[in-house]
Image: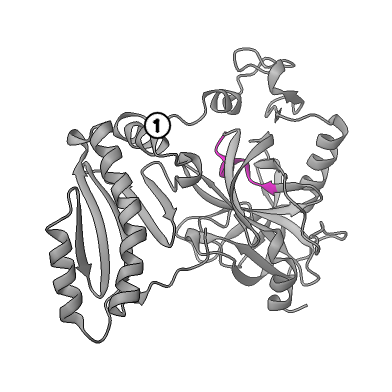
Amino acid sequence: MNTQDILDTYIENIIQIMTPYGTGSGFIIDDLIITNSHVVGGLKEVVISAKKIKRKIVQVVYDDPYFDIAFIKIDFPLPEQKLSLSSHSVEDGDSTIAIGHPYGLNYTTTEGIVSRALRLQGDIEYIQIDAAINPGNSGGPLLNRDGEVIGVNTFIIQNSNNLGFALPYFYIQEAMSDFKILNKEDIIKCPSCKNLIQEKDIDNDYCAECGVKLEVARLRRKGYKPTGSTKLLEEILTSLDINVTLARRSQSTWRVDEGSARIEINYYENGIIIGDSKLCAIPRENIDKVYDYLLEENSKLSYLQFSINENSIYLSYLIVDSSLTKNEGKMALARLFKYANKFDDILIDNFGAIKQKRDEED
């Protein structure tokens, strides 16, 4: 198959994975989502989305930081066209296709060849490839021309020219087999003794078999807990019936869709908090009427303000973190959500403003 055929056939199996620490990729094999341990970041829950799946919270049921493999439980219908692991060995010079979501650019596909079928790093074998992979590709599948998974894209050498490494399919096969034989969830694979330990059997983050300290157990127990103004912002969003886990794009950014409007909230290092909605683009005609309307409405608004950046109309809320309080923050963001959804329709329907185009939901 050519690259486009492979993407069209298996695209529903390609998963985007999001945590407060960043984004990565994954793919469906059997009834599990396969990804890298470093993608899930030691969390029990992560957010995923896919071609036919809106953002949802799912459970990480297996975490192996040594081989950098993690499994996520599937609680949605499986795609009709299923990916499968390769049934034959990888050779130098084989054609490869890497699929993932680098930098949030969904379903990016790159072609290359196997530069070295077996490249030893410590005592783990990797497939070295020259297909261009970037941050966000981690955890995505490396496929051959038959559309079979030959590996999971795992890491790159920084500042190099297309030096990527994928964990071979046989490690995934072995891990899946051991996990399914055990038939339990919340499993951590000890990096020292290599035993599979159920989380409930871990005492004070130490392996129940060999006694080594399990960092991933500590991370899973601790979870992600925002602090300071970030915590306050999430408390405000929660009070507005927003699921902050689904809204969160990073530790300092959130996105909320309200009706036809999309609101982005960003907390910057200098202490500035900006919530804004890119409503629409100014029309080519009757621009003066649009300006008059925005100026008139600005005089009526409290907490919020219209602005124009290049040709786009924004409705925004700006505050310094030291001035943010729960009551006023709740009032301001509630108004932002309500009026963004209201004003984009007014500007489009009454003034001929141009509806914003959006990329696929990440």
Which of the pair 213/228 is nearer the observer?
228
> Which is nearer the eye, 114 or 357?
357
Q: Which residue is mark 1?
A: 226
Task: Report helix, strand or loop for mark 1.
Answer: loop
Give the image location of residue 37, x and y in percent.
Answer: 62, 40
Picture coordinates of residue 52, whole percent (x, y): 66, 60
Residue 283 is covered by the magenta coloring: no
Location of the N terminus by quadrant is: bottom right
Query: Residue 239, located in which quarter of the rendered image?
Result: top left
**Residue 83 seen in render:** yes
Query: Looking at this rendering, what residue extends furthest in the front direction?
Result: 350
Residue 192 percent location from the top left of the image: 69, 26
Seen from this angle, which residue lies furthest bottom?
285
State yes or no: residue 36 in magenta: yes
Q: Quadrant of residue 98?
A: bottom right
Residue at image coords 39%, 60%: 261
Mark 1 burial class by Cα count in 10 Å: few <14, some 14-19, many 20+ = some
Q: Is residue 70 above or below residue 316?
A: above
> Which residue is depicted at the point 69% across and 42% down?
72
The segment highlighted magenta reads 34-42
